[in-house]
Amino acid sequence: MDILRIILQVVFIIVCIALTILVLMQEGKAAGLGGIAGISDTYWGKNKGRSIEGTLIKGTRYLAIAFIVLALVLNLNF
């Protein structure tokens, strides 16, 4: 069981580092008053999921889920 715990801890550290990098790579959402006009149209456009920003958001979502699951599993006393 100790080997499995060490492997999970290493994976947890990798997920933490990757999650930090992905969050820092994303653009800020506070565009001020400029976001009300034309910029918001491109943000909510049809191809948002195919853009780099959409990919970063999806990756952040998956890594956040992995982070929570691994944190819960590592917190168990087995």
Image (cartoon, grey):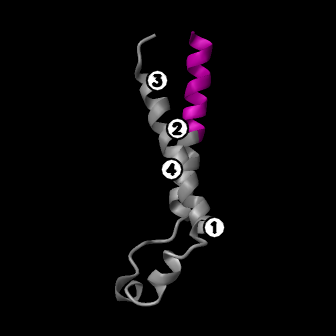
Secondary structure category for the residue under label 3? helix
Q: Which residue is mark 4?
A: 61
| Residue type pointed to by label 4 | Arg
Q: What's the magenta region?
A: 1-14
Ranked by sequence position, the earlier of labels 2 and 1 is 1
Ranked by sequence position, the earlier of labels 4 and 2 is 4
Quote the CA–CA distance across marks 4 and 2: 9 Å
Q: Please, is residue 7 above or below residue 18 in the view? A: above
Q: Which residue is mark 1?
A: 52
Disc 3 + disc 2, Cβ < 8 Å: no
Of residues 11 and 60, the one nearer the viewer is 60
Query: What secondary structure do most residues of the magenta stretch adopt?
Result: helix
Quote the CA–CA distance across marks 1 and 3: 31 Å
Quote the CA–CA distance across marks 2 and 1: 21 Å
Is 8 in the magenta? yes
Disc 2 + disc 1, Cβ < 8 Å: no
- Circle 2 crowding by C-alpha within 10 Å: few under 14, some 14–19, many from 20: some
Residue at coordinates 57% horizontally, 41% vertically from top-left? 15
Residue at coordinates 55% horizontally, 18% vertically from top-left? 5
Is 31 in the magenta? no
Disc number at residue 66?
2
